[in-house]
């Protein structure tokens, strides 16, 4: 994930050099790190993500910050859950019994019913995040990975799964986080009656297709480091929590199509479609010598590895025109990237992206490297070594 402290320092220094910066854009908004850091500096923000769960997180972090009212609602929702003696299960989807014990289904259903009793959309969104944590920690999927891997039957039977207790702790903790953020915003004069004073626009959709109404002064983002099936499958991670939510609360366009399979969201993401044309490889190779050299090094590897890499860069390149169109002439771009390995060879994502951006009339100002001292993922997965350092590209759009 994007490290808040790094984003904070980079954004702070960018604003020192360019005090005219007013709006930040993140085309791969994720859980909203750049959104939050932008708000703490009193900047407007535009963001996009293809994952409905990411959009939910961003919209909650954007406010409103009705802290006293939210505290009352937390108490009320907990009271509704504790008074609920019903045992009916509120959701039904393929493999429900595979992923959840029946007693967990009943507990999660009580939480869902209580959330739906609240008449405020902003509060329900806050509670859905708490439910998501309860779902993840009580499902039969292993929590050691973002992928859905079912536990052994013996382990499932003996696990202590207190979904309601997890939910209570999550919303209590998250309420404190909201309070802390609100206090910071109030101190700087950025809140007006609980609402953030500047504009925040978070859009569910594909960065390859969307456009925002207002130009941004700086792009700050961390795109996927590769196709989700071989890096971090955020769609799989989101699949079970989304099954328990009222999808329309996230966004009116979210429907069951997003949950057609555990892979649906990942398939919609960059590199999700592995159908490659010869022209895809040729176009990328023409724009990026680094891509051409890397692909040449994979000739002895199984063909699917070159296809995965090509599909990802084809889709990433398709984002660049829309992204550049959201940025004012002369605007800055800050890309935080990781160079993973495929087929035992390190993918030079930073070099390839800088060349692709140069083909779109952007200029590289500097490249920074940050070691990742502590990681929240394994050193290796089934496909390759994971990432131990990040590159930060700072680029400028042509005037």
Image: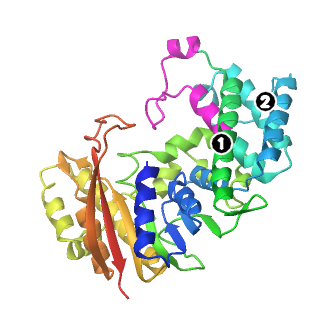
State the residue at coordinates (29%, 45%).
387
The image's mark for residue 110 is 2
Q: Is mark 2 on a helix, strand or loop?
A: helix
Q: Nearer the viewer, residue 360 or 95?
A: 360
Contact between labelled residues 1 and 2, with CB atoms less than 8 Å apart: no
* Percent x, y of residue 353: 29, 67
> Where is residue 283 shown, x and y percent of the image?
26, 75
Name the colouring of the figure.
rainbow
Looking at the figure, which quarter contains the C terminus? bottom left
Image height check: is 304 above or below 291?
Answer: above
Q: Does the magenta stretch include residue 20?
A: no
Q: How far apart are marks 2 and 1 (CA)?
A: 15 Å
- Residue 161 x, y percent position in the rendering: 63, 20
Q: Give the residues in magenta.
A: 130-159
The residue carrying pointer 2 sits among few (fewer than 14), some (14 to 19) or many (20 or more) residues within 10 Å by Cα, namely: many
Disc 2 versus disc 1: nearer the observer: 1
Which residue position is annotated with label 1?
Answer: 129
């Amino acid at each position: 994930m994007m490290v808040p402290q790094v984003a904070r320092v980079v954004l702070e220094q960018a604003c020192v050099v360019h005090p005219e910066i007013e709006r930040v854009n993140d085309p791969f908004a994720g859980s909203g790190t750049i959104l939050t850091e932008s708000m703490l500096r009193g900047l407007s923000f535009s963001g996009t993500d293809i994952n409905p769960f990411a959009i939910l997180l961003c919209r909650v972090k954007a406010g409103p910050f009705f802290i006293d009212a939210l505290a009352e609602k937390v108490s009320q929702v907990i009271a509704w859950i504790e008074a609920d003696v019903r045992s009916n299960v509120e959701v039904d989807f393929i493999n429900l019994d595979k992923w959840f014990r029946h007693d967990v289904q009943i507990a999660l259903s009580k939480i869902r019913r209580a959330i739906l009793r609240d008449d405020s959309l902003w509060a329900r969104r806050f509670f859905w995040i708490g439910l998501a944590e309860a779902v993840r920690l009580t499902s039969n999927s292993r929590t050691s990975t973002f992928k859905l891997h079912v536990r052994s039957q013996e382990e499932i039977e003996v696990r202590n799964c207190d979904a309601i207790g997890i939910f209570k702790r999550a919303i209590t903790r998250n309420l404190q986080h909201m309070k802390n953020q609100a206090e910071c915003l109030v101190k700087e004069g950025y809140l007006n009656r609980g609402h953030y004073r500047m504009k925040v626009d978070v859009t569910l959709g594909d960065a390859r297709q969307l456009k925002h109404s207002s130009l941004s002064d700086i792009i700050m983002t961390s795109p996927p480091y590769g196709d989700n099936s071989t890096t971090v499958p955020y769609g799989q991670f989101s699949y079970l929590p989304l099954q328990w939510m009222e999808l329309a609360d996230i966004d009116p366009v979210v429907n069951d199509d997003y949950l057609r399979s555990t892979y649906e969201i990942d398939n919609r993401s960059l590199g999700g479609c592995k159908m490659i044309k010869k022209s895809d490889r040729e176009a990328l190779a023409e724009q990026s010598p680094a891509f051409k050299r890397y692909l040449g090094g994979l000739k002895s590897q199984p063909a699917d590895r070159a296809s995965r890499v090509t599909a990802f860069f084809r889709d990433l390149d398709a984002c660049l025109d829309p992204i550049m169109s959201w940025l004012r002439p002369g605007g800055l771009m800050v890309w935080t990237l990781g160079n993973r390995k495929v087929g035992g060879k390190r993918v030079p994502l930073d070099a390839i992206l800088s060349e692709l951006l140069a083909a779109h009339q952007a200029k590289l100002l500097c490249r920074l490297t940050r070691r990742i001292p502590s990681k929240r993922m394994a050193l290796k997965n089934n496909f390759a070594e994971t990432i131990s350092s990040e590159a930060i590209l700072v680029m400028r759009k042509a005037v």
